[in-house]
Image: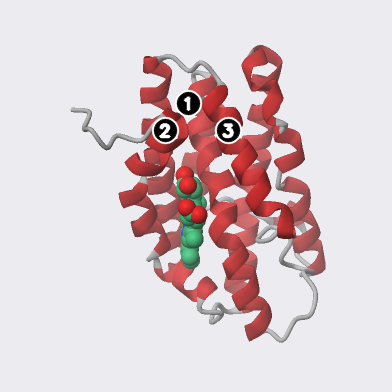
Amino acid sequence: MTTATAPAGIMGRLKAETAEQHAIAEAKPLEAALIGGSIAHDQYKDYLAQRWLIHRELEAATDRVLEEDRRLSGLGLPDLYQTANLEADLAHLGLDTAAIKPLKGSEDLIGTIRNAPSPAVLMGIYYVFEGSKNGARFIARSLGKAWGKTDLEGMKYLDPHGEAQRGLWMKFREDMNAIDWSAEEQDVMVKAAQDTFDAISALDDEIHAA
Ligand code: HEM
C-alpha cells in the first residue's frame, strides 16, 4: 500500500525501496574493510577485478539499450561509465585483465545483465552501480589516508568524478525522474535494483572469503 509519505518519482522509490538492502550491503565485511582502510592490497585487487567484469558487461548492455530506447539519451550514460577507470586502476596495480576469472557472484550478475529483458530492468541494475559512487568517494578518501597516497592512481573507480560527483548524481536523479516510466516499468526497475543489491552483497562475501 502507498502511504502518505511515499517519495515522489522513480528515484524516490528506488532509494526508499532499496534502503534495507543498502544497509545490508554497506555493512558487509568487505565494504567495512574498504571504508575502514584495512583491506589487504590483494583483496582490493580482487574487488576491482570482479567489478571490472561486471561493469564491462553492464556498459555493453547499456550501449545496446541506448540504441533501442531514445528516452535514455538525455542521461549521458557513456560519460558515467567505469570500465576504463577500472582498467586504469588494474593496470596501475599490475593486474592483467586477461587473467581475471569470474567468481560465481559475478557470473550470476553477468548473466542477469546479459538477459535483462527491458530497458527498465537494466536501469534498475545500473542505478545500483551509479548510486554506489556516492559512498565510494568516502572509501577513496579513507583508503588514500590508510595507504598514505597523495593521488588517485589505483582508485579511479572509487572516485571517478571528484568534486563533480554530487552534481552528476543530482542530474542523474532529475533525468531519471523526467522519463515517463510506466507503473509496470517502475515496479520491475525497483525489483531489479533490490536483486542487484542482494547479488552485490553475495559477491562481496565471496570476495571477502576468497
Ligand atoms: C562502505 C560502504 C558504503 C558506504 C559508506 C555507502 C554510503 C553511501 C552514502 C553516504 C550515500 C549517499 C546518501 C545520500 O546522499 O542520500 C550512498 C548512496 C548510495 N549507495 Fe552506498 N555506501 C556503501 C556501499 C554501497 C554499495 C556496496 C552499493 C551497491 C553496489 C551502494 C549503492 C548505493 C546507492 C544505489 C546509493 C544511492 C541511494 C539513492 O538513491 O539516493 N552503496 N551510499
Circle 3/circle 1 CB separation < 8 Å? no
What is the number of callouts on the image? 3
Q: Residue at x 60, y 77 (%)?
A: 142
Mark 1: which amino acid?
Val
Residue occupied by mark 1: 121
Q: Which mark is residue 192?
A: 2
Circle 3: residue type: Glu
The secondary element bearing badge 1 is classed as helix
Q: Is residue 3 left or right of residue 77?
A: left
Which comes sooner in the sequence, label 1 or label 2? 1
The kind of residue tagged 2 is Ala
Can you say which quadrant of the picture contains the N terminus?
A: top left
Q: CA distance from mark 3 to mark 1?
A: 19 Å
**Does residue 182 lie above or below 62 as drawn?**
above
Q: Is residue 10 visible?
A: yes
Regarding mark 2 in the picture, which secondary structure is present there? Answer: helix
Mark 3 lies on residue: 174
Disc 3 vs disc 2: which is toward the camera? 3
Query: In the image, what residue occupies the spot 72% across and 53% down?
Result: 164
Q: Nearer the viewer, mark 3 or mark 1?
A: 3
The spot of residue 205 in percent (x, y) is: 41, 62
Measure the C-alpha gap from mark 3 to mark 2: 20 Å
**Extreme-left residue of the structure:** 1
Which of disc 1 and disc 3 is earlier in sequence? 1
- Residue 73: quarter of image: top right
